[in-house]
Amino acid sequence: MKELRQRDITRALLRDIEKKTRELGGPVRIMEVCGTHTMTIHRYGLKQPLEEAGIDMVSGPGCPVCITPNEIHEACLDLLTKRENLILASFGDMTRVPTGRGSLQTAVPARSSRLKIVYSPEESLGLARANPDKEVVFFGVGFETTIPSIAFTAKKARQEGVLNYSVVASLWLIPPALRAILEAGETAISGFLYPGHVSTIIGVRAYEFIPQEYRLAGAIAGFEPNDILLGITAILDQIRNGQPGVANEYKRAVSSSGNLLARAIMQEILEEKDATWRGLGRIPRSGLKLRAPYAAHDALEKFGLSLNERSGGLAGCRCGEILRGVISPPQCPLYITACSPDSPRGPCMVSFEGACYISYKFGRRERSKKV
Amino acid sequence: MCLGIPARVTQIDASGLGKVDYLGTKIRVNFSLLEEIKPGDWVIVHAGFAISKLDEQEAQETLSLLREIAAKEDDREAGP
Ligand code: SF4
């Protein structure tokens, strides 16, 4: 598989891309929807060569930690700080996202309660089995990549009757978010680089409304540098031919209808709801909640928590605009001067998929490489 | 968050639990989201679950496409 990273191939692909953008008469702006693509582009030093080849990559909403709105973080803070005898299980980066009242990591838990970092939803269910005398709440965040695993775990909890287990569902669907970005029309883009791992679940067809209704080009790509360049090449070909479509440049992992078994489990356990994203606002049918038979495992229902959508944002943080592709991290006045991975002022500086974090981490190396 | 790693299946039991080998490390994985997985298959692992089986033939096609590009590149560098 070394070809996927081989430098001479990267150079050849970049030259081809440059030729194509020149033929198209100027720079082409593409949104990479997925934060892991943002990471690959920076890690392999592709950002600048792509710019030189006439491609302006702009980051999109593909960071679940980033788009989870303040009110959900606050609901989890309430659980941890006000409920005694509870374990809040969470993926690591969620615990460092600041709110107006600090983060889960800086919060002081209620008596006999604690925060536990887990790597997989199953691990959180294991905690519930091992601690039958405590309530275990999993802060379940993710896109379609993660959602089936969370749904499967909730299903298992019900089957096994693990009554002390519940989930704060912070689950987000990519296609409605892309529609919202296009409808808002704030960012002029000529194509989407679609997220590879979300696509393993939802398949190529899930994006077909985009070329059909919006005449916008797009390609699904894998996560090696040459995968991404193949995706960009496919987008340019569609633009040149005036035939927008959904190219699949990650065929080794993505099929046209996705992972049917995973989709069936999602369908069985979860139902769509309107949801409010950080930065993107309320988007119809863009979130998921547990279906009625699983209400006993829905933490918001179980503990009678309501989400306070007026809880507001974070003073000065411009993550919202970054997630919509309207500005890039250096355009935030707090970037580096007041906001860094050690003391983040917003989620985009916390997550490994956050545009600010990635820009901070790799931007320096890129800048120093130039000299 | 959507980080997924390609890994080779080394072991799988009847309940859908098993292990993969990732760069020499054995990792416990739940295979319940995939059908017909057997040792030797390559899968994408995300948050403790295998979410996609890698298609060997498709992988080879991408690689040979890239090798063609590399070959043209060699010609160019060796060219006049
Ligand atoms: S640099 Fe910090 S404060 Fe500014 S948008 Fe990014 S995360 Fe928010």
Image: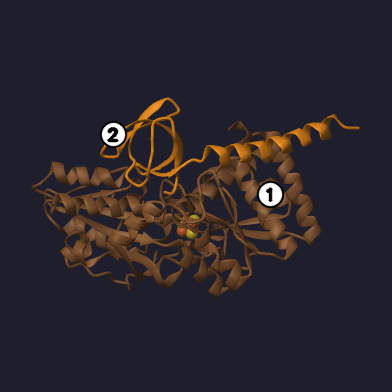
Chain colours: A brown, B orange
Amino acid type for the residue under numbered disc 1: Leu
Amino acid type for the residue under numbered disc 2: Asp
Residue lying at 70% horizontally and 57% vertically, measured from the top left: A236
Q: Is residue A254 left or right of residue A247?
A: left
How far from the left and from the top, in percent, is residue A72? 31, 63
Question: Quick one: quadrant of the C terminus of chain A?
Answer: top right
Up the image or down, A289 lies above or below A329; here it is: below
Q: Chain of mark 2?
A: B
| Pointers 1 and 2 in contact (C-beta within 8 Å) | no
How far from the left and from the top, in percent, is residue A40? 55, 44
Q: Nearer the viewer, residue A236 or A310?
A: A236
Residue lying at 25% horizontally and 39% vertically, measured from the top left: B15
In which image quadrant can residue A4 be found? top right
Residue lying at 63% horizontally and 42% vertically, measured from the top left: A226
Residue identifier under label 2: B13
Q: Nearer the viewer, residue B28 or A166?
A: B28
Q: Chain of mark 1?
A: A
Q: Nearer the viewer, residue A153 or A118?
A: A153
Q: Is residue A58 shown to the viewer in this render?
A: yes
In which image quadrant can residue A44 be found? top right
In which image quadrant can residue B10 be found? top left
How far from the left and from the top, in percent, is residue B16? 29, 39
Quote the CA–CA distance across marks 1 and 2.
46 Å
Residue identifier under label 1: A50
Q: Residue furthest right?
A: B80
Q: Nearer the viewer, residue B72 or A141?
A: B72
Q: For the residue labelled by badge 1, is the local secondary structure a helix, a strand or a loop?
A: helix
How far from the left and from the top, in percent, is residue A319? 47, 61
> Callout 2: 10 Å neighbours few (<14), some, many (20+)?
few
Up the image or down, A229 lies above or below A297; here it is: above
Q: Is residue A161 left or right of residue A42?
A: left
